[in-house]
Image: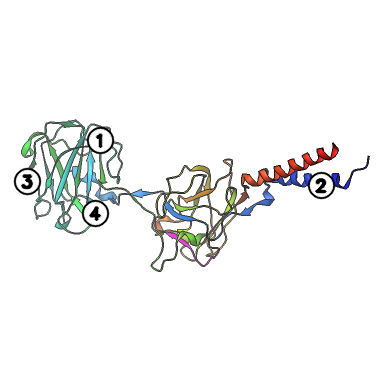
């Protein structure tokens, strides 16, 4: 039986449509495309948040309990420095004393807040110490001796409640700097520093700074360059630089729409190879991006796609290796790429990269698939009408 020109044409179009529709659902490796373009929405981020508390190894809070007036706790974070301590026995505190440190009277605390709790301590070193339910016992001003390594007069107060842990915060210091220091501290069970001193060397104690956390992401230079957008501008002479160092990165929303990432590539920046990323973590989301620039980028529901190490060239402005991404999580509209480590963090003051490109497959809008299926269905219907 001879086929009409219409039948041949219909079958040819149907075959093409079926191939096209199938390709929409089953993208192949040969179809991998660059997913990021200059101008795509992009945010600088850093997963780390901080109180600014900085206490070095030789000046930890433990040294306020060692009985040596020459050692000290020194916090470089600024106002509201302090500590949390858990004595060996829960008890009532009704007075305390402090011993001034070896130098710089301007670093002496000028006011205090004393709290108590019976919660297990889950706050950690350099945190803001707010994980527990704290009760304010007493607060006030301090008048510590001007002489160095000198015991203060007892500070007494009324308190009948026993607590297992205590938090002391110093909202202000005598001077205008950012350093707070104390040589020794004692908590006593009775007024005027009488009764037992509850504190002893070896008691669990951490340094804190009782302030709201701040994001560590800090980008850019004085001339307004070196922002995250310069990591996707396809210009190797520009760069994205973030002073947050480890755990910095970016969030990008490719204008191609929903996509499946299968690899990526980085280009090194113009200088300081110590700042190069040495590891990576890639996340995806289909949520609208509500995180803001220079935050931790955590407001969306992020899905971990893959992670690994990367060794970038020592040459500057050089294209790095194509990094394969084991993506079993599927398609996303936005991506978060984080660099947990650097080539030499100790020698770097920042993380930097010249270019970032994600590769993969574009997933079509559902309307495109529906349109193709609709045309195919129409041809089938017309064919049946012709037969009738």
Query: Are the residues at dot 3 and dot 1 in contact (C-beta closer than 8 Å)?
Result: no
Query: Which one is in front in this view, the residue at disc 2 or the one at disc 3?
Result: 2
Q: Which residue is mark 1?
A: 133
Q: Secondary structure at mark 3?
A: loop
Q: Quadrant of residue 320?
A: bottom right
Residue under circle 2? 12
Q: Secondary structure at mark 2?
A: helix
Any part of residue 353 in sight: no
In this rendering, would 315 be left or right of 32? left
Task: Specify the farthest residue to the right.
Answer: 1
* Residue 107 screen position, x and y as percent: 18, 55
The tag earlier along the polypeptide, 3 or 4, is 4
The earlier-in-sequence mark between 3 and 1 is 1
Q: Which is the main secondary structure of the residues drawn in magenta?
A: loop
Of callouts 2 and 4, which one flags the residue occurring earlier in the amino acid sequence? Answer: 2
Distance CA(mark 2)–CA(mark 1) = 73 Å
CB atoms of marks 3 and 4 within 8 Å: no
The residues bearing labels 3 and 1 have C-alpha atoms spaced at a distance of: 30 Å
**Dot in front, 2 or 1:** 2
Query: Which quarter shows the C terminus?
Result: top right
> Which of the marked residues, 2 or 1, is nearer the chain's N terminus?
2
Q: Which residue is mark 3?
A: 153
Task: Inspect the magenta stretch and tell me whether residue 99 lies in it.
Answer: no
The residue tagged 4 is: 78
Q: Camera-side residue: 334 or 181? A: 334
Q: Which residue is rendered at x = 40% and y = 65% of the image?
A: 221
Residue 225 place in picture, x, y as percent: 44, 66
SS label for mark 4? loop
């Amino acid at each position: 039986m001879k086929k009409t020109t219409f039948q041949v044409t219909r079958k040819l179009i149907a075959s093409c449509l079926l191939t096209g529709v199938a390709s929409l659902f089953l993208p192949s490796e040969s179809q991998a495309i660059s997913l990021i373009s200059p101008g795509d929405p992009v945010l600088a981020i850093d997963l780390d948040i901080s109180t600014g508390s900085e206490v070095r190894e030789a000046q930890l809070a433990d040294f306020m309990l060692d009985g040596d007036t020459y050692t000290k706790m020194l916090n470089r974070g600024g106002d509201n420095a302090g500590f949390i301590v858990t004595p060996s026995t829960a008890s009532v505190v009704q007075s305390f004393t402090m011993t001034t440190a070896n130098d710089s009277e301007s670093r002496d605390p000028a006011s205090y807040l004393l709290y108590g709790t019976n919660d297990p301590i889950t706050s950690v070193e350099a945190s803001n110490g707010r994980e527990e339910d704290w009760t304010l016992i007493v607060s006030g001003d301090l008048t510590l001796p001007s002489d160095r390594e000198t015991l203060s007069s007892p500070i007494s107060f009324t308190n009948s409640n026993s607590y297992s842990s205590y938090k002391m915060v110093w909202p202000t210091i005598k001077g205008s700097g950012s350093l707070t220091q104390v040589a020794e501290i004692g908590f006593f069970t009775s007024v005027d520093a009488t009764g037992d001193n509850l504190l002893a060397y070896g008691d669990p104690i951490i340094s804190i700074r009782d302030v709201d956390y701040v994001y560590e992401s800090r980008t850019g230079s004085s001339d307004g360059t070196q922002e995250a957008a310069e990591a996707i501008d396809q210009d190797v002479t520009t760069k994205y630089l973030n002073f947050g160092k480890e755990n910095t990165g970016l969030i990008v929303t490719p204008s191609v729409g929903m996509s499946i990432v299968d690899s990526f590539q980085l280009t090194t920046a113009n200088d300081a190879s110590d700042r190069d990323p040495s590891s990576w973590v890639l996340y995806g989301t289909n949520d609208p991006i509500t995180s803001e620039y220079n935050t931790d980028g955590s407001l969306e529901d992020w899905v971990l796609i893959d992670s690994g190490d990367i060794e970038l060239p020592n040459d500057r402005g050089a294209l790095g290796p194509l990094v394969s991404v084991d993506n079993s999580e599927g398609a996303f509209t936005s991506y978060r790429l984080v660099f947990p480590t650097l080539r030499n963090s100790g020698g770097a003051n920042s993380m930097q990269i010249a270019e970032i490109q994600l590769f993969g497959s574009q997933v079509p809008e559902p309307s495109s698939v529906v349109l193709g299926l609709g045309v195919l269905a129409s041809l089938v219907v017309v064919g049946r009408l012709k037969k009738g």
